[in-house]
Amino acid sequence: MIRCLAMETGAPASDDADDAVLVAAMAQGDRDALARLYARHASLLLGLAVRIVRERREAEDLLHDVFLEAWRAAKDFDPKRGRVRTWLAIRMRSRCLDHQKSARVSRNAGDAGLEVVVDEREKSTPDHGRVRKVLGTLGEEQRQVVELAYFDGLSCSEIATKIAKPIGTVKSRLAAGLTRLREGMGAK
């Protein structure tokens, strides 16, 4: 599920190759490479974090944590396993969900629906527009379970409890929604 949603948005291959070169340079201790990678992806990751944790200050802290973690783990990155942007987005999502599940964060925050809180610069990126467009094609029921699974990190049984539907219904809605997202993001 993460791989489908984690920004498989068709970035040019040259950007992916440049990102991999930057991570390799980071593994050799190149701080400028870290700064360049941060400049390329910070707004995207911050938008994701704000959407999940709903507080900009917390999201900014998590953003810095993710880049510090990327700096430390750069030597372990394998470009054959995926794109740098996906690697960073998965790390960000994981940190955000850990934060949300920590004892000091209330799990009673309201659902924000499809409204994605993002940095103003990100609203103009092609990826942001494509993701919003594809999410908009999902029916309300499919979009709800996809958002609860991805942004809130809920399991199918937790989603079933939250929306008062059988777990089989949740699983079928999630599968159908993810299939439509994959198809929509694969088309240019």
Image (spheres, rainbow, N blue to C red):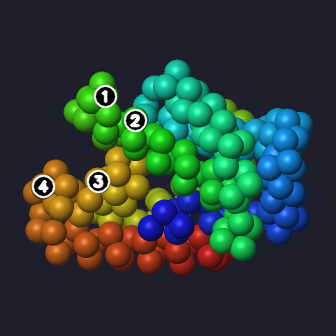
* Mark 2 / mark 4, whichever is N-terminal: 2
Residue 6, quarter of picture: bottom right
Which residue carries the number 2 mark? 99
Amino acid under disc 4: Thr
Amino acid under disc 1: Val
Q: Which is closer to the viewer, label 3 or label 2?
A: 2
Which residue carries the number 4 mark? 161
Secondary structure beneath disc 3? loop
Is the C terminus in the top left, top right, bottom left or bottom right quadrant? bottom right
Which residue carries the number 1 mark? 105
Q: Residues within 10 Å of mark 4 (few under 14, many from 20)?
A: few
Is the N terminus in the top left, top right, bottom left or bottom right quadrant? bottom left
Which residue carries the number 3 mark? 154
In the picture shown, does residue 180 fall above or below 68?
below
How far apart are the two marked residues, 3 and 1, measured between alpha carbons?
15 Å
| Residue at the image point whose x is 47% and y is 59% from the top | 136
